[in-house]
Image: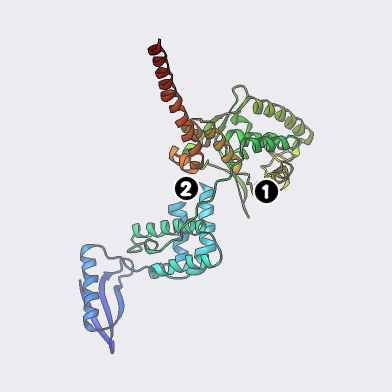
Amino acid sequence: MAGQLIERGERNWLVRVFLGRDSSTGKRRYHNHTIRGTKKDAQKYLNAKLREIDLGTYIEPTRVSVNEYLDQWLESAARPRVREATHVWYGDLLKHYVRPSIGNERLSAIRPLDVQTIYTKMQQRGLSARTIRYVHVVLSSAFKQAVKWRMLTHNPGDSVELPRVSRREMAALSPEETSRFLNAARKDKWAVLFNLAVTTGMRPEEYLGLQWKDIDLRSGIVTVQRAVIWRSKVGWYFSEPKTPRSRRSVPVPTSVVKALKRYKSKQARHRLKVGQEYQDHDLVFATTHGTPLMRRNLVRRHFKPILKIAKLDKSIRLYDLRHTCATLLLAANENPKVVSERLGHASIAITMDTYSHVLPSMQRAASDKLESMLYTKLRHTIGTQKKVGKK
């Protein structure tokens, strides 16, 4: 493979390597690179490029922009392997945080410092470390694919520093607070929804996407098969559950099953009254016209007022009802494996890590059991032996 060093001025060298002819046009193709330094520096660069070509590791710099590449990556690589909701989320993250900074730059020109600058600006805007790490996961995944497609020699995202994520303290209601919440919700339109959320530990998008065919009212079992997703400019749509293990069957307490039966009868009467205007999606929890409930409306019009009536901390989130279910069960010494399956976690390790705050009380209960099993019986035996000896 031929290479040239062309002097372009004082300490200025053009390194040119012939790459062969273009298969479609027949034109000569060259790798051109300017070195500002000595002839020795230029020769060193030339030797390195010739070696890359000989070893088959050379990657020709692409003229594709970052925007063009990200469009291709989202469609060809990301879409086939992630849920639609995740695909949309990837696109939103790249649109808001990556494209404005480096979208118009050539993909082959991106350096680790360019990526680091994106994250620094995000921090300066007050964005959380968690958000920055989400962006990094998506962008680094895109660059990793570019390396596989031989459009980059290395992943620029591998050499950046990420901010540390401060662990958010888990929020969950105590047994007494949970009773107050459910009592305050009794007169609310969506009382049965809140009871189902607390007792099943389902994610909001899961119980808002429930259809009546998912509920066996005879056996009292709810099956999670989908989630309802809302996106701006798109509207709502059904999506796959978060993970494969999110598809699960959850037994429901008898009291909640009875409430669901009463609610279903009430909903049926309403549907007859509305008639053809009702959009029948078979949803358990639907608006007066049959469409899915919007989470933010549920929170603002129902959940927050209930918290106020129950005199609970207004910072409690709707999602915290899921945490409440898990915490109550673990505090009651329920098998963590059972709790993990109820929540639909990918593994029991996630459950134990997420709810590690409950472990101290569980460990204390375990110690008390050992005390009762071993030492209480031992003291009783020693006491009996002493009485026999005195006789």
The quarter in which the N terminus is drawn is bottom left
Could you say which is closer to the camera, residue 276 or residue 173? 173
Apparent side of residue 8 relative to residue 143 in the rendered image (left or right) = left
Give the amino acid type for the residue marked by disc 2 in the picture. Val
Q: Residue furthest bottom?
A: 10
- Residue at image location 20% in from the left, 65% down from the top: 54
Q: Is residue 148 visible?
A: yes
> Marks 1 and 2, how far apart in space?
35 Å
SS at badge 1: loop
SS at badge 2: loop
Residue 358's disc is none
Q: Earlier in the sequence, mark 1 or mark 2?
A: 2
* Residue carrying label 1: 314
- Residue at image location 33% in from the left, 61% down from the top: 150
Q: Is residue 204 visible?
A: no
Q: In the figure, 226 relative to 10: above or below?
A: above
- Residue at image location 38% in from the left, 60% down from the top: 146
Contact (Cβ within 8 Å) of mark 1 with mark 2: no
Q: Residue furthest right?
A: 273
- In front: label 1 or label 2: 1
* Residue carrying label 2: 82
Q: In the figure, 331 relative to 157: above or below?
A: above
Q: Position of residue 199 (x, y in %)?
A: 60, 33
Q: Quadrant of residue 308?
A: top right
Q: Position of residue 385 (x, y in %)?
A: 39, 15
